[in-house]
Image: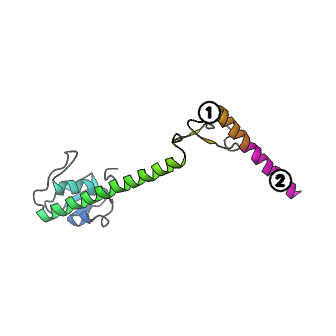
């Protein structure tokens, strides 16, 4: 998506007060200062137009944007980038903590039952990547035996 997670509808992003949407094209804007029509890129590209900073160098700089608006948009983008970086760091910290609960070497899981044709009837087992195949077989057998035992107990209650 061209807006890269930005607000596609007017009103949610503060930058919409400096442009007008074009009806029928949710990514098109008209600059309220210079009248430039941008047919793509959405509010994210429009903010680049006002800030005079475009990472892709495909946006014309607004010649009439007041300095205070330019600074407001720059701070808005900076704060959003900061919040996004913090969110990503928090997510990575949580992932790291979760990996720690699995042990030092068990960072990924492997599903070895993907090729079963009767996947609806078969159980799917997830294993740590460094688990030996013999351990996997023993684990699978133990789970099946436990389920069979529970099934027998439940069926005896019904009779």
Mark 2 Cα-neighbour bin, 10 Å: few <14, some 14–19, many ≥20:
few
Mark 1 Cα-neighbour bin, 10 Å: few <14, some 14–19, many ≥20:
few
- The reply to whether residue 157 is in sight is yes
Magenta highlight range: 143-159
Residue receiving disc 1: 132
Residue at image position (24%, 57%) is 78
> Can you tell which quarter of the image residue 50 is in?
bottom left
Q: Secondary structure at mark 2?
A: helix
* Magenta region, main secondary structure: helix
**Residue placed most toward the observer, 104 or 85:** 104
Residue at image position (87%, 54%) is 156
Can you give x and y, in whole percent of width and height, for residue 100 in the image? Answer: 50, 48
Can you give x and y, in whole percent of width and height, for residue 125 in the image? Answer: 64, 42
Earlier residue among tags 1 and 2: 1
Q: Nearer the viewer, mark 1 or mark 2?
A: 1
- Please state if 4 lies on the left or on the right of 62 as rendered: right
Per the rendering, the mark at residue 82 is none
User: For the image shown, how many numbered marks are present on the structure?
Assistant: 2
**Residue placed most toward the observer, 92 or 18:** 92
**Residue placed most toward the observer, 102 or 119:** 102
- Verify whether residue 150 appears in magenta: yes
Which residue lies most toward the front here?
104
- The reply to whether residue 32 is in sight is no
Q: Secondary structure at mark 1?
A: loop
Residue receiving disc 2: 153
Which residue lies most toward the top here?
133
């Amino acid at each position: 998506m061209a807006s890269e997670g930005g607000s596609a509808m007017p009103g949610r992003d503060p930058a919409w007060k400096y442009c007008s949407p074009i009806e029928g094209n949710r990514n098109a804007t008209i600059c309220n200062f210079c009248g430039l029509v941008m047919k793509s890129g959405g509010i994210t590209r429009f903010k680049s137009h006002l800030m005079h900073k475009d990472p892709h160098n495909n946006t014309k700089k607004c010649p009439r944007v007041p300095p205070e608006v330019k600074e407001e948009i720059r701070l808005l983008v900076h704060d959003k980038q900061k919040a996004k970086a913090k969110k990503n760091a928090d997510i990575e910290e949580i992932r790291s903590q979760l990996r720690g609960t699995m042990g030092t070497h068990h960072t990924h899981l492997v599903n070895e039952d993907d090729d079963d044709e009767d996947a609806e009837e078969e159980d799917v087992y997830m294993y740590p990547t460094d688990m030996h195949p013999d351990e996997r077989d023993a684990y699978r057998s133990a789970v099946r035996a436990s389920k069979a035992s529970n099934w027998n107990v439940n069926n005896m209650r019904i009779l």
